[in-house]
Image (tube, rainbow, N blue to C red):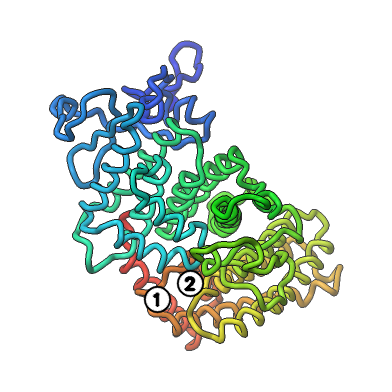
Amino acid sequence: MAADIADNADGGRLQVRQAAQVCAACKSRKKKSDKALPSCGYCVRKGLNCIYEPRPRDDARENTSSGYIGNTISISSPLASQHVILFEPGATEANLYRQVLHLIRQTGQFVDDISARYFQGIHRYLPFSSRSRFHESLITLGVIPSAGFSALLLSICVATSSLRSPNSRPFDRQSLYLTAKSFLAQIQASYPPSLDLIQARLLLAVHDYTCGRPDEAFDAIAGCTRMAYATGLHLHFNKNHTLHTTTSNILKGREAANTWWGIIICERIFFCEVTVLDQPLVTVIPNEDVILPTEPEVLELAEFQGYGLSPDVPVSNLESVNIGGFGRAAQAAWLLDQVLDSFKIQSLDTKLNQLEALDSTFQNFLGVLMQQSGGKVGKFCEAVAITIRALFTLHWHIPSQLQHVEHSTNPSLEGWSSRSDVALDTATKMVLDIIDAHDALDITAPTYSFIVQAALKYVRGKPSWNDDAWLRGAEERLRTSLDEFNRNLDMST
């Protein structure tokens, strides 16, 4: 493909190249577009994924097999030659919903199949959706699901399709993924932001991360965050934001708070893997007194009566026993946030003192997690994985800083490198223990593969690791586990 920006022969000025047709978002708005590559001006201003679809063939344009005639938006189908989605007042959302159901059926699954896999899998670690509200949106008679809910349903299909299912028929997962991204871009351009749409974008970002695309995931979470800020989602950090209202609104408020926590957690774990570290985080954890998210078992209660069902525990209370897996993941992300903030400190002595204190806090926190989980695979897996990944991040940073310092000028720096080596050895052994305790087919904790990669990087970075029997065995176990995980994960998505 030719460069998007090329030198102009007249005066050496830069000339922006244009696409042959407008992008999906501008097409849905029926507005003039500058067609700039790689992203048009409108999508850049709105933070949208700018998608230029291939020009459809004439026979595809004339296809009216869906039975609908009128103003339409075309979305390339992964499973058929063309999907036509009607955007007309009154009929739009019903048509969107039918098209999404049709796509799901072409994967060989039903809505019940993908929702069961979602709530038994990803939902255990990132419970930002209420199961009761989700099913209510599906079964309420006479009510057409919103466009945002249709987008969420399609994102769930994509996210749950990354792991191979014996019940699904073979299909092009990459095309399904691209269709979902295009679909979400058009919905975002045509409808006001909603909680369902934010959750749909968050799920696709998690999908990018799980499939080994952290840079794409980090870009996606930034757009998701801007949409969340626009809807005031961050205000649900304050529990009083939804007090003295109906039970339904209280539940939705808790779901909104969990979604915001999900964005905060994901942005930080994605950041640990990005190629370019010199970029800011969009979300902010306001203070140490912010209340932890609601656990899924509480969120899923059919008769949700209010905030008394779960204790309001601040994120800084690491010793409390009344915290579940999602709350622990939020605390791990809060501690990771402090590590990333410490990296910005200019004074080396101040930085190292703060990192030393954080290292001690992480060690104690890991002890709490191990005791609470009883050493069993379960709902605390993501919290443990985030904590271990944070320790790798912390102790890789310290030696990089000490390389530029004369140790002899400060005796207190002498032991830092050796202490970091011990910490990284311990973290690697914990990853090996996690591998032994897991069946790779059942792994759904998003950060699992990245702590395996971190441990593998550490082992291979040891001088002459091939000559050390233990390191050589550790490398083989880590590599085998990662290969098995990738085989069961469809990496083409």
Q: Identity of the amino acid at label 2?
A: Val
Q: In the figure, is residue 236 to the left or right of 352?
A: left
Q: Secondary structure at mark 1?
A: helix
Q: Position of residue 438 (x, y in %)?
A: 43, 80
- 2 or 1: tag closer to the N-terminus: 2
User: In the depicted view, which residue is nearer to us: 465 or 31?
Assistant: 31
| Residue 418 visible | no
Report the front residue among 315 and 309: 309
Residue 481: which numbered mark, if any?
1
What secondary structure is marked by label 2? helix
Q: Is residue 188 visible?
A: yes
Asked where in the image residue 166 lies, by quadrant, the reply is bottom left
Labelled disc at residue 374: none
Residue 103 shown left or right of residue 485 in the figure: left
Q: Position of residue 12 (x, y in %)?
A: 50, 16
Query: Disc 2 designates what residue?
Result: 452
The residues tagged by marks 2 and 1 sit, at their Cα atoms, a distance apart of: 8 Å
Choose between 470 and 261: the one closer to the eye. 261
The image shows a total of numbered marks equal to 2
Q: Are marks 2 and 1 in contact (CB under 8 Å)?
A: yes
Task: Look at the picture and state if 376 lies above or below 210.
Answer: below
Q: Position of residue 105 (x, y in %)?
A: 22, 53
Q: Left or right: where does residue 269 sit relative to residue 207? A: right
Q: Residue at x 49, y 20 (%)?
A: 14
Q: Residue type at mark 1?
A: Ser
Label 2 packing within 10 angstroms: few (<14), some (14-19), many (20+): many
Task: Kindly indicate the quadrant of the structure image that contains residue 396.
Answer: bottom right
On screen, residue 59 above or below 194: above
Q: Is residue 491 left or right of residue 10?
A: left
* x 31%, y 43%: residue: 97
For residue 166, above or below residue 39: below
